[in-house]
Structures are given as structure tokens and as C-alpha cells.
Image (spheres, rainbow, N blue to C red):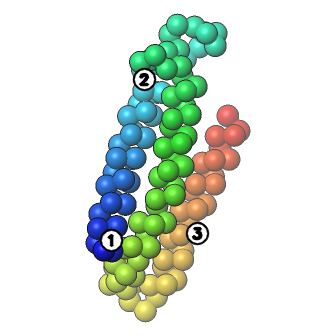
Amino acid sequence: MKKSDMKWLVDCLMFVDFCSLLVVGLILAFAIPQGGGPTAPTHYFLWLHKHQWGNIHFYLAIGFLILLPIHLSFNWAWIQNTFKGYFGGNWQKALGILSVVWVGIVFVGWFLSLVR
């Protein structure tokens, strides 16, 4: 399989996965109400319990996280050239700072979700 075909396949899978994540997240947020007991009939949507929807959302997120580094590796030359265009000789430093900030934001969000 050619690299362009693999890149297309990964991009399509990421698109479908992200759209599925969005739809399941919206279902969890708005279609299934909070509260009540674990067997309350309102905790079901399309014959699946809220926890089952949560599991689907989790596994879709894991799939997205698996596809993300593959996508980045296919597009690494474009990322480098873009950063070189914006930051010139300091492109590696800028990319490193952006990566550290991004990872920091993810960990802060994770920590804040545990504190609630």
C-alpha cells in the first residue's frame, strides 16, 4: 500500500472516530439525564445504559489516541516546514514549547477532573 493511501486511510479513520466521539459525548451530556438510581429507565438511550455509552466514548478516545501519532508521523515534514516558516531558526524550540504547554494543559485538565 502506498504512503498516500495509508495517509488517506488514517485520516478517514480519525475523522470517523472524532465525529463518533462528538456524537457520543453529546449523547452523554444532553440525551441521558443525570441523577436517579443506577437502574432508572431514564439512564438508557437507544437501549444502552449511560455507562455503556461511557465505555464506547472511552474506547473511541483510545482509538483516536492510537491514530494520532500515526497521523503526526505521516505529516511530520509539513509540521516542520510550517514551524520553520513561522519561527525560522527557532522552530525546534517553538515546537518543543508548544508540546510542553499542550501536555501541561492536558494534565491540568485531568487533575481538575479528579478534584471535582
Q: Amino acid at mark 1?
A: Met
At 64% from the left and 40% from the top, the residue drawn is: 113
At 48% from the left and 79% from the top, the residue drawn is: 94
At 34% from the left and 78% from the top, the residue drawn is: 78
Q: Quadrant of residue 21?
A: top left
Q: Residue furthest bottom?
A: 89
Cα distance in 3D space between marks 3 and 2: 33 Å
Residue at image mark 2: 30
Quarter of the image that includes the C terminus: top right
Labelled disc at residue 15: none
Q: Amino acid at mark 2?
A: Phe
Cα distance in 3D space between marks 1 and 3: 34 Å
Across and down, in percent, residue 54 comes to 55, 31
Cα distance in 3D space between marks 1 and 2: 42 Å
Mark 3 vs mark 2: which is more N-terminal? 2
Residue at image mark 1: 1
Judge whether residue 84 can be spotted in this image. Answer: yes
Quarter of the image that includes the N terminus: bottom left
- Callout 2 environment at 10 Å: few (<14), some (14 to 19), or many (20+)? few
Residue 57 horizontal side relative to residue 6, left or right: right
- Callout 3 environment at 10 Å: few (<14), some (14 to 19), or many (20+)? few
Across and down, in percent, residue 43 comes to 53, 14
Labelled disc at residue 100: 3
Q: Are marks 1 and 2 in contact (CB under 8 Å)?
A: no
Residue 73 horizontal side relative to residue 82, left or right: right
Mark 1 vs mark 3: which is more N-terminal? 1
Which mark is in front, 1 or 2? 1
Which mark is in front, 3 or 2? 2
